[in-house]
Image: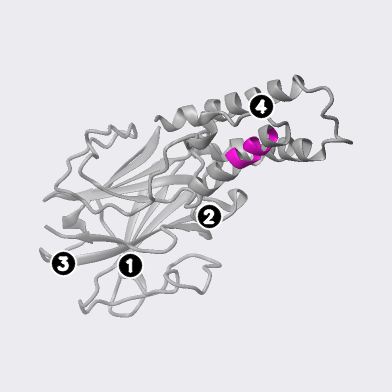
Amino acid sequence: MDRRSGKNRAWDLLTQARQILAQHPEATEENNPEVWEALYAAEGSDWFWWFGEGHSSNQDAVFDQLFREHLSAIYTALNEPIPPALRQSVEKHEAKEAHRPQGFIHPTIDGCGDEQDWDRAGRIEVGGARGTMHRSSAVQRLYYGWDHLNFYLRLDLKTGIKPDRDLPGELHLLWYYPNVERSLSTIPLLNVPDLSPLNYLYHHHLGINLQTGSIWLEQVGEDGNWHARTTRADVAVKNCMELAVPWADLHIEPDYCLHLIAVFADRGEFRDYLPEKELVMLQVP
């Protein structure tokens, strides 16, 4: 079932329940409060916020079931048979799991997010992982991968999110190399929370101005400070954000592993980060 149909299907089920209730004028709020309590619960706007593409969490299946239970309670209170449709999920719920890269990718960096370009990429669902809908990330999912020349990153935004309106002005990528001796330093932004992995020490920092498209690269020197380095990274922001960073910019050996985090900021001040509970793990070919 297409997730985009979930919202419409939920409205159809609610409309059918309302029509059944309209056939029972004797079921007033005074003499049949159960049916009205179930109706008001099913009409809550939060249900229709969760259904459909763009808003999601690890509890989607639970929300789906609760919504159908409220509708079923309307039929039960009216002594009407429960429609078979209410015994089936409103929409398909797939487990949110990280998918590792399946092979080299060679995407065109144009901000269009061509699915064939990224079909073998790694994927991390971001969506509603932060809990309540009001605190959920503007990014729906993160794709990543590499070939012999570059590593690639793609951020898909939730439906309705506009990069120039709804995102902080800057994206900062920071990474280090586990089990490799490198100079390290803290994230060079203001007001970064002292929690893992934001309080880790990193070796490279790539900054991106999402409005102008300008990119800068920094590397920690032996003095423990960040120093500017040249970069030929390429970024495009349109339907999504796509990025290519040449391995040559990093001056690292083949088979090295990289741990990466993405941080949003405004004018150098921390705003948000992703993924929330894990680092993106890359490997130099």
Give whichever of 127, 227 is nearer the camera.
Answer: 127
Q: Range of the magenta residues? A: 68-74
Say left or right for 104 vs 116. left
Answer whether labels 2 and 1 touch (C-beta < 8 Å). no
Sequence-wise, the earlier of marks 4 and 1 is: 4
Label placed on residue 17:
4
Residue position marked by numbered label 3 in the rendering:
256
Residue 93: x %, y % from top left: 42, 42
The answer to which image quadrant residue 260 occupies is bottom left
Residue 281: x %, y % from top left: 27, 61
Q: CA distance from mark 2 to mark 1?
A: 19 Å
Residue position marked by numbered label 2 in the rendering:
267
The answer to which image quadrant residue 197 occupies is bottom left
Would residue 45 be seen by someone viewing this image from the given angle? yes
Q: CA distance from mark 2 to mark 3?
A: 32 Å
Residue position marked by numbered label 1 in the rendering:
227
Q: Amino acid at mark 2?
A: Arg
Residue 127: x %, y % from top left: 46, 48
Badge 3 element: loop
Q: Amino acid at mark 3?
A: Tyr
Would residue 161 be seen by someone viewing this image from the given angle? no
Q: Amino acid at mark 4?
A: Ala
Sequence-wise, the earlier of marks 2 and 1 is: 1
